[in-house]
Amino acid sequence: MSVRVQTEDFDVSAEIARLTGGRDDIGAVVTFTGLVRGEAGGRALSEMTLEHYPGMTERELERIEADAHERWPLTGTTIIHRVGPLKPADQIVLVVAASRHREAAFEAAAFLMDYLKTRAPFWKKETGRDGDGSWVDARESDDAAADKWQRRPAKR
Amino acid sequence: MSVRVQTEDFDVSAEIARLTGGRDDIGAVVTFTGLVRGEAGGRALSEMTLEHYPGMTERELERIEADAHERWPLTGTTIIHRVGPLKPADQIVLVVAASRHREAAFEAAAFLMDYLKTRAPFWKKETGRDGDGSWVDARESDDAAADKWQRRPAKR
Amino acid sequence: MALKLLYFATVRERLGRAEETVDVPAGLQTVQDLLDWLRARDESYAVALSEDARIRAAVDQVHAKPETTIVDAREVAFFPPVTGG
Amino acid sequence: MALKLLYFATVRERLGRAEETVDVPAGLQTVQDLLDWLRARDESYAVALSEDARIRAAVDQVHAKPETTIVDAREVAFFPPVTGG
């Protein structure tokens, strides 16, 4: 299990290798990479700034990760979230879930993202090409996505 | 859309970059990497050989990929499957799905794997450390996983 | 009781500060009590922590509800719904 | 009618060959007809293409069912259920 909050970019292959290196009991690795889009609600963006709550962020991500390990038989997970100023097409977030079987890896990666979106204390501010800054509104669909895991059975 | 059947290994980061490079309308990239496990049914393995049906394999993977693009609004997909002799911990298969939103990327990647497992003409032969070779049996759970997409609604 | 307060995103911008330490009356028991006390204290809090703004709170770096206790808390944070990922 | 037959995995190993071209009687209409004809032709086919082996087929590189036509087909492949991924 590993959680990192950083300004630097990340390399997906290197993060996969970090989980799989030196072992041969992993059959499936699923990664999710979130990227900054250059447009939001019809507005062209020049920058996206990620604010967070140092200390709580790491603790919350670790709780989410531990929750995933209780629900699925995982051989490893990684969560990396960037903070600070980012540009369109930059990578923002990476989630990696490794398991013996693909179902657990897929479900755990989706779960980690759904929970991260609604629980980890990050806030996005978009700056338009016109120079105007505005905070991103939380999406109700993200709450619904996180809520659906409440109904799911445990370990499979 | 891109399909490759090859003996060489692949690099996940490079494949992500191939889909995202030069554009800023992608918000989510999901990858699935399948790896050779060193053990099967309690037997330690020394090698796994992938046989396939040249020509049909590529056509079938392209059909599966086109099917995913009909079901979800994807900005790009990649399927790479290795053939020939592989060792435990080697990468076997890569699926990449890119979209504006994470739900489509996650679902399409899972769909591609489920369909690939039941439709693409590959066959695995495992060689134990004892030198005995045996063909892998198809799992009924794979058929069930592929069947569940028949009940899903189209484009979202 | 000295309590560290932290503000993020819109709340931070509206208040014009990221954190402060305040002396809160001993009678305050919950996050809701603290919110009500702050709002009554100064117009700037009433605006920044307005009920319309869907303000969320964390007590000692754990997500909190209005009824969560703040007794013995070291820090309380106020912020809008999170938007990471 | 000259038809190219391809065999994979267990079927290939049991038959001892990966492909062959056979002259099939004009009356054969479907994959099932072809299977029955092959099985009756030689004991080695009866074993390699045994009904117990859950044999699958493809006609001109498209998955086929027992009732799929082989009229005008260029190649037919027989193999066990696929196990890639």
Image (cartoon, coloured by chain):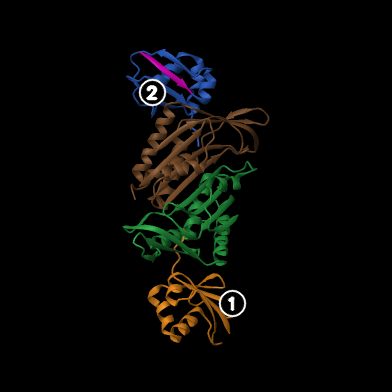
Chain colours: A green, B brown, C orange, D blue
Q: Which residue in the protein does label 2 denote?
A: D31
Residue B68, position in %: x, y? Answer: 38, 42
Q: Which quadrant holds residue A127?
A: bottom left
Question: Mark 1: which amino acid?
Answer: Arg
Magenta-highlighted residues: D1-7
The dot on residue D34 is: none
Outermost residue on the right side: it is B130
Assess whether residue C61 is covered by the magenta stretch.
no
Q: Is residue B84 above or below residue C42?
A: above
Give the crowd class for mark 1: few <14, some 14-19, many >=20 residues within 10 Å: some
Residue D12, x across and y down, in percent: 51, 21
Nearest the camera: B13 or A96?
A: B13
Left-right relation of B99 to A66:
left
What secondary structure characterizes most of the magenta part? strand
Quadrant showing the N terminus of chain C: bottom right
Q: Is residue C22 visible?
A: yes
Question: Three-letter amino acid code at disc 2?
Answer: Val
Residue B60, compared with residue D7, is above or below; it is below
Q: Measured along the vertical axis of the image, is residue C76 above or below residue D21? A: below
Instruction: State the separation of the CA atoms marked 2 and 1.
Output: 76 Å
Q: On residue C74, which mark appears?
A: 1
